[in-house]
């Protein structure tokens, strides 16, 4: 019997090595797997590369991981949001490497990794500071930048519902990067607000099929705050 | 400063002027700041579908106090509502809509726009203390039309419509039209072409506040 549920966050996070590249779903405070991210802190891993749209806020989730000095590098589109003070302190003190990526390129680099595409050309970022040093090529008279796929060793995502095969649904704006991260990592771990019996989820409504998900942990943490 | 007989448009009036030009049926993404105000200025009987980078088509009005849905935010992280017919999707699909040229229009704020339509709206310098780009470059490249809504000059009075952008570029040659608190200006192959000036302001005075040559409005 396939059962991807882990009884605890600690068990769901077993085996993540130092220096791992970790993809985080979430946009602002919505759809962030904050309890998995904080669980990562408990495992003691360090020297991480974190891929996320934002660089955390307040003192929860990613902000806690940053504050504890576990992150070497951040690959991010919009690190500076209201409440991202821990990121700002570390970055201005030179304690954190930042790779800034246009948001669509960030999503597409992960999608490409999940789809077996090693790199792709896009006009986004051409002739800007963010394409410095990258290979470029003209298509139809427009300059394009070669962008590399961005695979993760691990993805930490938040779902609304999950069954034991790892089929997932999301809630409203909580979907965001989560399905994209799920397909781009070798080990995808989901925290879910609700557990459903196998067959209970309408197959037409499953957003992330279980093939992209390795472990699930039930974390009924309630509404996003922030 | 000399006596003026004109009043610049306030933020909401700029947004209202932009909204006038958006026809029914367009799919539109609105940037942060003045552009966000455009949605509330589209007449309710005109169906325009607003897109948010974080996976939403069909953004509705801001929620009434006490009826906030904590799961429903826009790209500016503000709480929103969804209209009937709205849809949710993930980030790669959302940016496929943007980068795949499916949006009719994107309205963005800007620090500067050049006479060639270059847009600078993501960083104030190449040594920004905490740079953030978000979806600005994707939108500027991918939307079928890019309009800018902004103040005509900086707080210090320096022009924001310039020959060449001094701030880091978001995208080259992408802006088609600029709505400021003083005028509506098209970016044409020949440069900035004035379409409208606010009441009481002369073409010459507008030119004085602009960092590149303006072409006079078509008398027709």
Image (cartoon, rainbow, N blue to C red):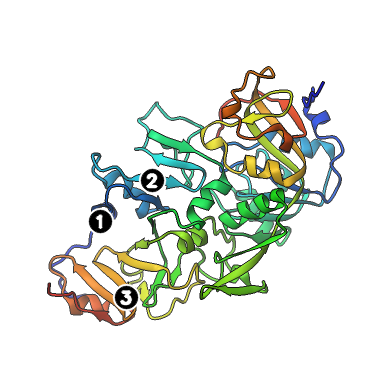
Quarter occupied by the N terminus of chain B = bottom left
Numbered disc 2: secondary structure:
strand
Q: Residue at x 48, y 47 (%)?
A: B75
Q: Nearer the viewer, residue B26 or A178?
A: B26
Q: Residue at x 21, y 69 (%)?
A: B195
Q: In this rendering, do the residues under marks 1 and 2 share a single chain?
A: yes
| Chain of the residue on which disc 2 is drawn | B
Numbered disc 1: secondary structure:
loop
Quarter occupied by the C terminus of chain B = bottom left
Residue at which label 1 appears: B21
* Vertical relation: B2 (above or below) A169: below
Q: Percent position (x, y) of residue B142?
A: 47, 60
| Chain of the residue on which disc 1 is drawn | B
Q: Percent position (x, y) of residue B38?
A: 31, 50
Image disc number at residue B188 = 3
Q: Percent position (x, y) of residue A105?
A: 60, 57
Q: Mark 1 packing: few (<14 Cα in 10 Å), some, or many (20+)?
A: few
Q: In 3D space, how far apart are the residues under numbered discs 1 and 2 (Cα atoms)?
A: 15 Å
Q: Residue at x 29, y 42 (%)?
A: B47
Q: Is residue A226 visible?
A: no
Q: Are marks 2 and 3 in contact (CB under 8 Å)?
A: no
Residue at which label 2 appears: B50
């Amino acid at each position: 019997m396939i059962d991807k549920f882990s009884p605890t966050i600690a068990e769901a996070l077993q085996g993540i090595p130092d220096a791992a590249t970790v993809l985080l779903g979430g946009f602002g405070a919505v759809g962030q797997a904050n309890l998995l991210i904080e669980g990562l802190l408990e495992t003691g891993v360090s020297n991480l590369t974190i891929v996320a749209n934002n660089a955390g806020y307040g003192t929860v989730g990613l902000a806690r991981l940053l504050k504890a000095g576990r992150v070497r590098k951040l690959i991010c589109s919009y690190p500076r949001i209201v409440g991202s003070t821990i990121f700002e302190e570390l970055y201005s003190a030179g304690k954190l490497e930042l790779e800034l990526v246009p948001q669509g390129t960030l999503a597409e680099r992960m999608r490409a990794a999940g789809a077996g595409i090693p790199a792709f050309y896009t006009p986004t970022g051409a002739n800007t500071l963010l394409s410095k040093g990258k290979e470029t090529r003209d298509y139809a008279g427009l300059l394009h930048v070669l962008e590399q796929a961005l695979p993760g060793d691990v993805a930490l995502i938040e779902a609304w519902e999950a069954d034991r095969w790892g089929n997932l649904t999301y809630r409203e704006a909580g979907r965001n990067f989560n399905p994209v991260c799920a397909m781009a990592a070798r080990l995808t771990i989901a925290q879910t607000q609700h557990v459903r019996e196998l067959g209970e989820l309408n197959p037409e409504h499953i957003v992330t099929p279980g093939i992209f998900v390795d472990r699930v942990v039930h974390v009924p943490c309630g509404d996003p705050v922030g | 400063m000399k006596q003026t007989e004109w009043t610049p448009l306030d933020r909401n009036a700029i947004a209202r002027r932009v909204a006038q030009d958006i026809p029914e049926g367009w799919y539109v993404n609105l940037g942060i700041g003045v552009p966000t105000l455009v949605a509330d200025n589209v007449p309710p009987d005109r169906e325009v579908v607003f897109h948010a980078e974080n996976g939403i088509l069909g953004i509705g009005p801001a929620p009434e106090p006490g009826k906030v849905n904590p799961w429903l935010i826009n790209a500016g992280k503000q709480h929103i509502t969804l209209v009937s017919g709205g849809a949710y999707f993930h980030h790669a699909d959302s940016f496929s809509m943007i980068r795949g040229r499916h949006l009719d229009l994107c309205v963005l704020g800007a620090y500067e726009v050049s006479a060639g339509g270059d847009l600078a709206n993501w960083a104030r310098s190449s040594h920004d203390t905490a740079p953030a780009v978000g979806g600005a470059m994707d939108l500027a490249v991918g939307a079928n039309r890019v309009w800018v809504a902004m103040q005509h000059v900086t707080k210090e009075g320096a022009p924001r419509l310039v020959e060449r952008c001094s701030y880091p570029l978001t995208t080259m040659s992408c802006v088609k039209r600029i709505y400021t608190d003083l005028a509506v200006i098209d970016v044409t192959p020949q440069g900035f072409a004035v379409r409208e000036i606010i009441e009481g302001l002369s073409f010459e005075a507008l030119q004085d506040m602009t960092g590149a040559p303006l072409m006079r409005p078509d008398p027709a």
